[in-house]
């Protein structure tokens, strides 16, 4: 499959290199090195005169083309870019004319959008389920339900041949339990550029939609952004943080994007969209159920989705200070799965602290991990079981223990 690709690229890039080669007399040294005119190597005497005039520009163009090609290849297929090629990539890029570099950016974006760069048809999409599984098992602590639910629903959805609906997941739980972290892990494993990808959009309610009086404007902007991203990317990811604070008007505007769509033309490339809604709605219900089960002698890992489902949904719908539970997203069952994030215990806070040390390459002691775990506030008052802030701000607390 891959052998077919370079051919079309030669065709794409050759005019570029040719044009730049001509317009850049002071350019690459390769052109100046070549012997000139009739003094050239054997066979030059037989050269056809018009062709002789073309030879030098062609040689320049060829050399320049090869450098563009190396740069382009590293961008589009980083895995084919070997280390020794990658090392000079910086200086190589900067020695090329500015116009060429801009052209290359446009070309890369264009190529990534329309051409088959990977098995997913878009080199911005990586869909690394092995990486996702490993991250959710190793880097996320205390969330066996979220780990399984997220992995199976997302993978199942992305492997559907022709989905006729966006996938909508709603993450629920107290702050610091890992909702944002899981959203980030998803972005990082599904997209080459993670949260920075063109195909991933993050909306934080109070940051992006702060003033209720502008809700009509926000509705328009949001619909435009969703549409534009879907046009640009055949696999798009939208993350709504603080979803419990979303204005009812905005929730309404999202409705049509979550509805079942008319079946697509089967020859058309399938388009997939994932919506994640992150909120603390239902957090108290989750905590109460978990506390009850733990006190009744269950182990944390025995707790199943079924134990939580009814209570969680009831609390979401009953919530009066948020429009989310009353929106059509919930009422018309446009949310595919409500994902519970369980309250974290001190052993999980220790693991978060350990990860924070390791991620900065710093040494740690068991005593330091214990101390950090002890700094958190635990609830309920008597049992002192759950960290009220989860793992939030644990990474800042490691500063107290640095030499
Ligand atoms: C997928 O992720 C794993 C773990 O992060 C990594 O080792 C592997 O190279 C990734 N695969 C691809 C194709 O990027």
Image (cartoon, rainbow, N blue to C red):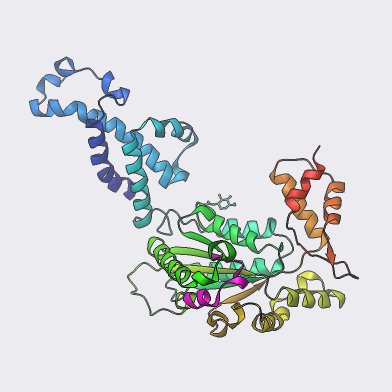
Residue found at x 82% / y 71%: 299
Q: Which of the 4 quarters of the picture holds residue 282?
A: bottom right
Q: Is residue 251 magenta?
A: yes
Q: Is residue 107 magenta?
A: no
Residue 17 position, x and y percent, is 27, 36
Image quadrant in which you'd find residue 209? bottom right
**Of residues 266 and 258, the one drawn nearer to the viewer in this rendering:** 258
Against 112, is 38 above or below? above
Q: Position of residue 63 (x, y in %)?
A: 30, 30
Where is residue 270? Give x, y as percent. 39, 68
Q: Quadrant of residue 88?
A: top left
Q: Point out the residue furthest to the left here.
A: 49
Drawn side of residue 36 relative to residue 275, left or right: left
Which image quarter is the C terminus in?
Answer: top right
**Residue 119 horizontal side relative to residue 188, left or right:** left
Q: At 26% from the left edge and 40% from the top edge, which residue is drawn? A: 16
Residue 37 vertical position relative to residue 292 in the rendered view, above or below: above
Q: Main secondary structure of the magenta part?
A: helix
Seen at 75% across and 75% down, the residue is 284
Is residue 72 shown to the viewer in this render? Answer: yes
Identify the residue shown where x is 74% and y is 58%: 391
Q: Which residues are magenta?
A: 239-253
Q: Position of residue 159 (x, y in %)?
A: 49, 68
Q: Is residue 123 left or right of residue 350?
A: left
Looking at the image, the residue that sits furthest to the front is 213
- Pick the residue in front: 71 or 42: 71
């Amino acid at each position: 499959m891959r052998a077919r690709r370079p051919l079309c690229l030669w065709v794409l890039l050759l005019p570029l290199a040719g044009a730049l080669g001509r317009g850049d007399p002071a350019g690459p040294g390769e052109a100046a090195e070549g012997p000139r005119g009739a003094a050239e190597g054997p066979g030059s005497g037989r050269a056809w005169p018009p062709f002789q005039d073309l030879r030098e520009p062609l040689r320049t163009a060829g050399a320049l083309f090869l450098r563009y090609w190396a740069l382009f290849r590293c961008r589009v297929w980083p895995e084919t870019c070997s280390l020794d090629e990658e090392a000079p990539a910086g200086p190589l890029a900067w020695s090329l004319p500015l116009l060429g570099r801009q052209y290359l950016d446009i070309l890369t974006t264009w190529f990534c959008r329309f051409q088959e760069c990977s098995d997913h048809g878009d080199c911005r999409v990586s869909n690394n389920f092995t990486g996702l599984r490993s991250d959710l098992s190793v880097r996320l602590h205390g969330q066996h339900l979220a780990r399984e639910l997220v992995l199976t629903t997302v993978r199942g959805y992305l492997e559907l041949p022709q989905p006729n609906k966006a996938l909508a997941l709603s993450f629920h739980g107290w702050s610091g339990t890992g909702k944002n972290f899981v959203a980030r892990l998803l972005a990082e494993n599904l997209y080459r550029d993670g949260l920075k990808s063109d195909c991933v959009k993050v909306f934080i309610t109070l940051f992006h939609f702060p003033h209720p009086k502008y809700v009509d404007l926000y509705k328009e902007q949001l619909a435009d952004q969703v549409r534009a991203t879907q046009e640009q990317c055949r696999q798009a990811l939208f993350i709504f943080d603080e979803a419990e604070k979303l204005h009812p008007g905005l929730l309404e505007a999202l409705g049509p994007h979550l509805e079942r769509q008319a079946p697509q033309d089967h020859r058309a490339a399938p388009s997939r969209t994932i919506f994640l809604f992150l909120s603390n709605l239902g957090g108290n219900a989750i905590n109460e159920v978990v506390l009850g089960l733990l006190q009744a002698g269950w182990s944390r890992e025995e707790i199943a989705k079924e134990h939580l489902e009814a209570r969680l949904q009831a609390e979401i719908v009953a919530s009066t200070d948020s429009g989310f539970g009353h929106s059509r997203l919930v009422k018309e069952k446009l949310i595919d799965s409500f994902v519970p994030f369980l309250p974290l215990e001190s052993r999980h806070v220790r693991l978060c602290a350990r990860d924070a040390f390791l991620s900065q390459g710093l040494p740690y002691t068991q005593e330091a991990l214990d101390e950090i775990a002890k700094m958190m506030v635990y609830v309920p008052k008597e049992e002192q079981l759950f960290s009220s802030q989860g793992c939030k701000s644990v990474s800042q607390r490691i500063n107290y223990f640095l030499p």
